[in-house]
Structures are given as C-alpha cells and as structure tokens.
Image (cartoon, grey):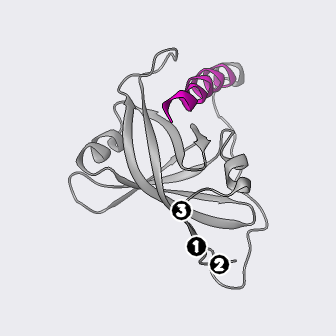
Amino acid sequence: MPNKVDTTLSNELLTLLKREQYVLLSTIDHETTGPNVSAISWLYAVNERSIVFAVDSESRIVKNIRANDEITITLIGNESTYSIGGKAMLVEERMEGVPLKLTKYMLQIKEVRDVMFYGAKMSVEPAYEKTYDPEAAAKLDRSVMSELKKSNALT
C-alpha cells in the first residue's frame, strides 16, 4: 500500500536486506549541502531497526556522513519502492578482514516509507552484474558480507 510509514523494517524487507542488494544511498553533500545519491550493494539488515553497510573509505559518502549523519536508503523490492531513513553511526573507520579500504556504518532506522506512486507496483527488481573478474568479485563480496554479518553483536 503506497505511502505507508513504519519505524521498522517489515519481515519482507528484512529478508531482502539479509543478502547483497542493490540500493541507492542518499546523503547531504558536505560542500554543496545538496542531495548526493550513490549506488551501493554491500549492506546487511542486522535486525528490523538497523542496517550496516560498507563504502570505500575515500568516497564522498564518508565525507558527507561526517558533515551530516542523516541518510536515506532507497530500496526497490517486494513490488514497491521504499525510503529507509535515519542516522548513520560510524562502526569501523577501516574494516578488518577485507582487502579493500572500506568504512562500515550502521543506519539506525527512524522511518520506513513505501514511496511507490499510487496505482502502481514494481514488476521487475533491479539486477546488476559485476564487470570484473567473477572469481575475484565473489571472493570480495563474501569477505565484505561476512564482516557485515558480524555486526549482529552491535545491537
């Protein structure tokens, strides 16, 4: 049902966010104070109130969150589009156990909105494929997701 607002993830969204998932991460740009949108896939729902995610430590996302910790994750799934907003809390400046320099954050969810326009549903979820060495991509994804899943102890 469009425009429904909750303070936690539903069981369906929790299930979707327990695996690598394409989402859009919106932050406030630290220089322009305008919106900044980035596509990410390394995230994991710890529970119905928290999502952890990893981003490149040198990315604009890190600088933006330092300046303003209010963020929104846009998820397309479960036949709709959802806006998941709240505060980003720094968990690890440099994630251990992964070969890249990644920073781990936890989104403390304040609201989950179904933002699909009236009278419509998503018929196909976004899909993507890695364009570099498939074995290297799979190994990297496994290591990052493994580290993100360790965040259960944080809540």
Main SS of the magenta segment? helix
* Residue 122 quadrant: bottom right
Q: Residue at x 66, y 84 (%)?
A: 118
Residue 115 circle label: 1
Q: Would you say the residues marked 2 and 1 are in contact, meaning their CB atoms lie under 8 Å apart?
A: yes
The amino acid at mark 1 is Val
Secondary structure at numbered mark 3: loop
Residues packed near mark 2 inside 10 Å, few (<14), some (14 to 19) or many (20 plus): some
Q: State left or right for residue 38 relative to residue 117.
A: left
The amino acid at mark 3 is Thr
| Residue 86 x/y as whole percent | 42, 56
Q: Residue at x 71, y 25 (%)?
A: 134
Residue 2 circle label: 2
Residue underneath mark 3: 7
Residues packed near mark 1 inside 10 Å, few (<14), some (14 to 19) or many (20 plus): some
| Residue 43 x/y as whole percent | 57, 39
Residue 48 circle label: none
Nearest to N terminus: mark 2 or mark 1: 2
The amino acid at mark 2 is Pro
Front residue of this view, candidates 119 and 109: 109
Say if 3 sits above or below 37 in the image. below
3D distance between C-alphas at marks 2 and 3: 15 Å
Nearest to N terminus: mark 3 or mark 1: 3
* 142 inside magenta stretch: yes
Nearer the camera: disc 2 or disc 3: 3
* 143 inside magenta stretch: yes
3D distance between C-alphas at marks 3 and 1: 14 Å
The segment highlighted magenta reads 137-155
Q: Residue furthest right?
A: 123
Q: State left or right for residue 42 relative to residue 16.
A: left
Secondary structure at numbered mark 1: loop
3D distance between C-alphas at marks 2 and 1: 6 Å
